[in-house]
Amino acid sequence: MNSKSCTLLLALAVLLPFSPAMADSDSKEIQALTKEVRALRAEVAKLRKSVASLQVIRPTLTTLMPDFAERFHIMHYAGEAGDWAVATHEFLEMQRMVGVASAIDPEKGALMKGFMTGSFNKINAAIEHEDPKSFIKALTDTVKNCNACHTAVGSGFIVITLDVDESLSMRHPHQLTRSKMMGQHMHKH
């Protein structure tokens, strides 16, 4: 029921009981509808409050990226070991996570998908052909794309590397170097 209908019902509920031609059953029906409209408005207000509280705790791409990075590195090591089943599994999970990224943040998710599509095609082909050389080349190209994407969203200071020994961990594969905080870098909901 739209707000115009609700307003009309409320007006009728106020004005019609004073009409001599108004039947008692009509008056009761309008009162029942008025009560229902009030209950629906209260429910909508409660739902809006619930949605607002969920907005505060919803994940961001910042929440998702460590999982993405970990899967990337597990895929990397699986491919180097010739464990193409694990490499395939991690690759498929990464593809799924790009879809999740689009649901979390449609704008940045689309950007991520754009940067990853070419890389994913190369990685997929290398895994399907069980070709270690083209696999490492595809991973190297993917790292470049990841770093370009980070730059595009204002997080260029997050530099991904294939060598986990140079970074914090597989979940946070950032090369640590001296850098200054960037003014526009923010994690927004």
Image (cartoon, grey):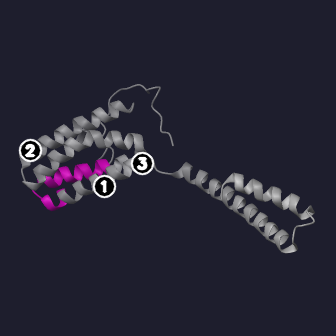
Tell me where the magenta segment starts and ends, as one range.
68-87
Q: Is residue 76 above or below residue 188?
A: below
Residue 37 visible somewhere in the drawing:
yes
Please, what is the dominant secondary structure of the magenta stretch?
Answer: helix
Q: Which residue is mark 1?
A: 96
Q: Where is residue 95 drawn, in percent x and y?
A: 27, 52
Q: CA distance from mark 1 to mark 2?
A: 23 Å
Q: Where is residue 105 drawn, in percent x and y?
A: 43, 45
Rendered residue at 80%/58% (across/down): 10
- Label 2, secondary structure: give it: helix
Assess disc 1: are there few (<14), some (14-19) or many (≥20) residues with their C-alpha within 10 Å of its C-alpha.
few
Residue 80 visible somewhere in the drawing:
no
In the picture, the disc for residue 134 is 2
- Residue 79 vs residue 5, the one in the foreground: 5
Q: Is residue 9 above or below residue 56?
A: below
Assess disc 3: are there few (<14), some (14-19) or many (≥20) residues with their C-alpha within 10 Å of its C-alpha.
few
Residue situated furthest bottom in the rendering: 25
Rendered residue at 83%/71% (across/down): 28
Of the two numbered discs 1 and 3 in the rendering, the one whose residue sits closer to the viewer: 1
- Residue 22 vs residue 54, the one in the foreground: 22
- Answer whether residue 77 is magenta in the image: yes
Q: CA distance from mark 1 to mark 3?
A: 15 Å
Rendered residue at 34%/34% (across/down): 150
Amino acid marked by disc 2? Ser
Amino acid marked by disc 3? Thr
In the picture, the disc for residue 127 is none
On the rendered image, what quadrant is the N terminus found in?
A: bottom right
